[in-house]
Amino acid sequence: MSDVSIASRRSALKFLATAPMLPLGAFATTSLLSGCATTAPSNAGFVSATFSGMAAPTLAEPTLMATMAVGSKLNVSYSDNTSRSYALAYQPFFMTGDMVPDGKGGVVLAGGYVDINNQPIIDRSVPGKERQFFSDCPDGTSLLSLPNANVAGVKGKPVFAVVQFEYTTRDQKGADAYGTLPSPIAVLTLDQDQKTGKLSLVKYHNVDTSSAHGLWITCGASLSPWNTHLSSEEYEPNAPFIGDVKHFKTFSKNVFGDENKANPYHYGHLPEITVNPDGTGSVKKHYCLGRISHELIQVMPDNRTALMGDDYTNGGLFMFVADREKDLSAGTLYVASLDAGFSADPAAAGASVYWVKLGHATSAEIEQMANTLKPADIMDVRKDDPKDASFTQVWVDGNPNWIKLKPGMEKAAAFLETHRYAGLMGGSMAFTKMEGTTVNIKDKTAYSALSYMQNSMVKGGKGWTASSGIALAKPLNAGAVIAHTLTGGQKDISGAAIQSEWVPSLTKTLLAGEDIAADAMGNLAHIDKIANPDNLKFSEKLRTLFIGEDSGLHVNNYLWAYNVDTKALSRVLSTPSGAESTGLHSVDEINGWTYIMSNFQHAGDWIPALHGKVQATLDPLVRAKYNDRFGAAVGYLTADLTAVRLG
């Protein structure tokens, strides 16, 4: 085994060995989930935990369909063969649109939008009702602690959450506002009660993103092993045809006051947020991880290898290996190439994964290219076949493009026109909406969500090519979670060694949804199976893969818990109808407490074909509870405050 392999394995073992034990029996008064103090049986250690799921809400109780409903339990087993059950509940920090404390004696608008000069962006769509835009779409969230944190007003221990806001659905007049505003990111200072584990908001700090040119459609997120928030910018603006991206001019106007100032090559990258001990934060955008539809990335325990979701049609499985640990500012970018055998059937063996090196770069050199290059400097891109053999056809978001690389522009293409270049270099650019990515360290397995398995993944479908190695016989609109076996000693297709022990070598379907004809509620996917998985997070201690849905097939979207040992799938939480489950982050331990972060976005975003049977009943309930559909909750799953205190 190489020195790199040994170091990587030792790092992983150290990570597992030093992680705190679940807070059961290790403290005088502890709880597995916050909000209810409990005492574990004397001398009994924690063994395992399972979830008892809840039934899907129905119109028999419409209020449950119109809110964050939790009817699940966490069951804990101890080493003396006893067990305890904890009823679960949902605890919000705030709803977007609320005025919350700014830590300076004043208040600030939660989820509020600001321009490049940090001035409020005003919704003027309804004369006489002008107000600052705020988001109804909180998304990626990270919960963390710092060793020397010191924030005024904290009575227990300070804990921090970083929350990003993907977009806002509509203006006050009802016009579509998707992608027209720069995504805000906030650092929350939370007061952790040491007796109950409850988290209370003390300070809300907007991160200044002006150094990153503002942020574009920040979706999922993850916490790095070095305690920073790794954000995302998805659906990168289509630079060669930026005139076709109608909302980009509006975005530019809102950010800079000039609809022609924003540069599309500044967006589609990876922002990293560092939290300071005083509850403030700063951003650094990394330009060398590929300009793709970043849903989120998962950094492996070696602190160098990152696996990336690509929320796109004709998307790829991308991997980045950093030059140095805990530093994403330089490294090597790869795209996967799949062998035959990929299937939507969990019983299938799966497909071997090979890796194509796209290039090595520093963030600084790619940022300079982004500042100075135009699309035509990098490659000639056509939408129609030029009938010229010097062009190569690739598929981009379900559409054919013919491209010809300009001489010497390989690096620029790899990092600024990543989708097109990955197709040119032979990557399997066929995945559809690859979203959340997470890792199971003990089993050395990574998981990715494919929200839909359609179009470019289906033989003969829109954007499909035989060379991708992916050829499903029929679509699976409900999507699936796929599992990647991680191994070391891998080489790229040129024969060069990949300097990582955490490289996917086999991928297969782990869990699949099931398409159905509409049921009595209007669901178009089996109600007791996942549908359109999006957020994924794995808990090492609970041995549980948490799965949040972004479904156009379930009337309500759900948060699921899948035990990788027992294979039990349990519905843990139901979001308001028309909303998606976002902000998922499983935190095994902070000061002896365990948390599952969960948000939702765009409640009451009705789809006639899906919600036709429930909309009339639920719409007034959703509007009454969530500020006429403009508000959304940011919070966490906790033990029910009415649960029994065990002595």
Image (tube, rainbow, N blue to C red):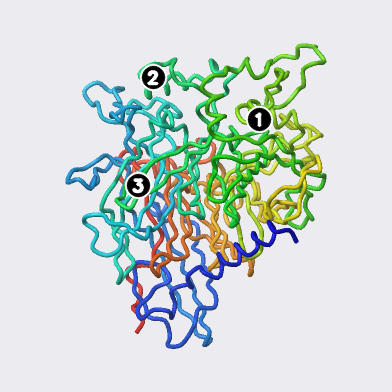
Distance (Cα) linking label 3 and label 1:
33 Å
Q: Which residue is mark 3?
A: 187
Measured as percent of width and height from the top left, residue 432 is found at 65, 38
Q: Residue at 56% of width from left, 38% of height from top?
A: 294
Amino acid marked by disc 3: Val
Going from N to C along the chain, the mark reached first, 3 or 1, is 3
Q: Residues within 10 Å of mark 1 (few under 14, many from 20)?
A: many
Q: Which mark is residue 3?
A: none
Nearest to the observer: residue 222 or residue 209 = 209
Q: Compared with residue 310, is residue 143 higher up or lower down, i.e. above or below?
A: below
Name the foreground residue: 596 vs 632: 596
Question: Where is mark 1, residue-wise?
Answer: 414
Place of residue 16 in the rendered image (x, y in percent of width and height, measured from the top left): 56, 67
Q: Residues within 10 Å of mark 2 (few under 14, many from 20)?
A: some
Crowding near the residue tagged with mark 3, few <14, some 14–19, many ≥20 C-alpha atoms within 10 Å: many
Amino acid type shown at disc 1: Ala
User: Mark 3: which secondary structure?
Assistant: strand
Q: Earlier in the sequence, mark 2 or mark 1?
A: 2
Q: Quadrant of residue 329?
A: top right
Residue located at (70% from left, 17% from top): 406
Question: Which quarter of the figure is the C terminus placed in?
Answer: bottom left
Note whether 105 is above or below 363 in the view shown.
below
